[in-house]
Image (cartoon, rainbow, N blue to C red):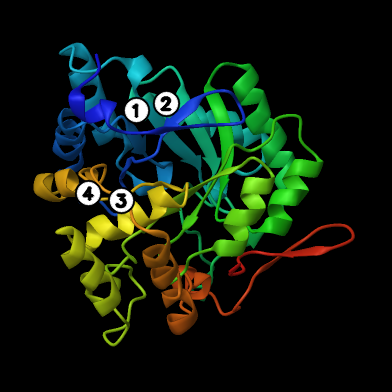
Amino acid sequence: MASSGAAKVPKIKLNSGYEMPMIGLGTWKSEPGKVTQAVKDAVDIGYRHFDCAFVYQNEAEVGKALKEKISNGDVTREELFITSKLWNTFHKPEKVEPALKKSLSLLGLDYVDLYLFHWPISFIDKDGELFPKDEHGKHLFEVIDHIDTWREMEKCVELGLVRSIGLSNFNSRQIQHIMDNSKIKPVVNQVECHPYLNQKRLIEFCKMKDIVVTAYSPLGSPERPWAKPDDPNLLEEPRIKSVAQLYRKTSAQILIRYQIDRGVSVIPKSVNKSRIEENFNIFDFSLQAKEMENLSWLDEEDNRSMNVENLLNVSETLLLVKYKDKSVYLQRKEK
């Protein structure tokens, strides 16, 4: 059951043949107890793409909202595009399918439209802990070849548990490793992306490989746990505020439109109905080439990237996933 709002949203064709709405509702760090209403509000506004993950610990709340909206006839399952992600403790081949089935159970779905390899690092599975640590407080990692995990994700496609599979937080070398050893190619690479971290080179690489880039934290993630008080605030950038004033839009709307105009799908998050609606209302204008260029230059001026050391509180600046004859960096900024 289409709505006028949903009809405004362009879709992008994935290399699996399926289509994905260019804007979705992110659910990372969404406050517990508020996610169900946020998803219901989003459906009413016109969102059909919802980005979830087991580690967010709110898939049951998302599922509750989807069940109600489908039961009420407000939307059909076929109109929805639901993403979930394989967490780092479930990379061993025998854990992949059960992990996906757990997310399906929480979401109340028979299949997800997209299942992502959440991070290119593996944690030891320690008593079900999501972020396992040793007695010294250091995270416990193990080495599992990405290909071993990916092949089990491919089997999940064959079983009908997921329509398309993809990656998240992978760099070009890690993507190529998957591409060189897979039957089913990744359709998406989801990464942090905004004018402070525009991912230009990675986006170009993905386009060459027919992989869609999805931008998470498109507003610069001002609420990220590792933020410092003196970190620049993307929403307050004079250059962005100037463009926003020109179009009579908010800084957030300019930042979301910036991704759409680059051909990058985008998943801003909020549990506030007015902000969810504001983030959606970006299809009545587009940015000019010069404006896009000016916003992209902020990457050069700030040079800030998502810092895995801060996120996981590990001592290494970069973790290495070691293969038989080479090492691949966990996370590398690609301009």
- In the picture, the disc for residue 223 is none
Q: Pointer 3: what residue?
A: 268
Image height check: is 42 above or below 254?
A: above
Mark 3, secondary structure of its residue: loop
Is residue 32 visible in the rendered image? The answer is yes
Q: Is residue 277 left or right of residue 130?
A: left
Query: The residue under label 4 is which amino acid type?
Result: Asn
Cα–Cα gap, marks 1 and 2 = 5 Å
Query: The residue under label 3 is which amino acid type?
Result: Pro
Front of the two marks 1 and 3: 3
Query: Residue 332 sits in which quadrant?
Result: bottom right
Q: Residue at position x 25%, y 67% from top?
A: 243
Front of the two marks 2 and 3: 3
Circles 1 and 2, Cβ within 8 Å, touching? The answer is: yes
Q: Pointer 4: what residue?
A: 279
Mark 4 vs 1, N-terminal side: 1
- In the picture, the disc for residue 104 is 2
Q: Residue at position x 73%, y 44% from top?
A: 178
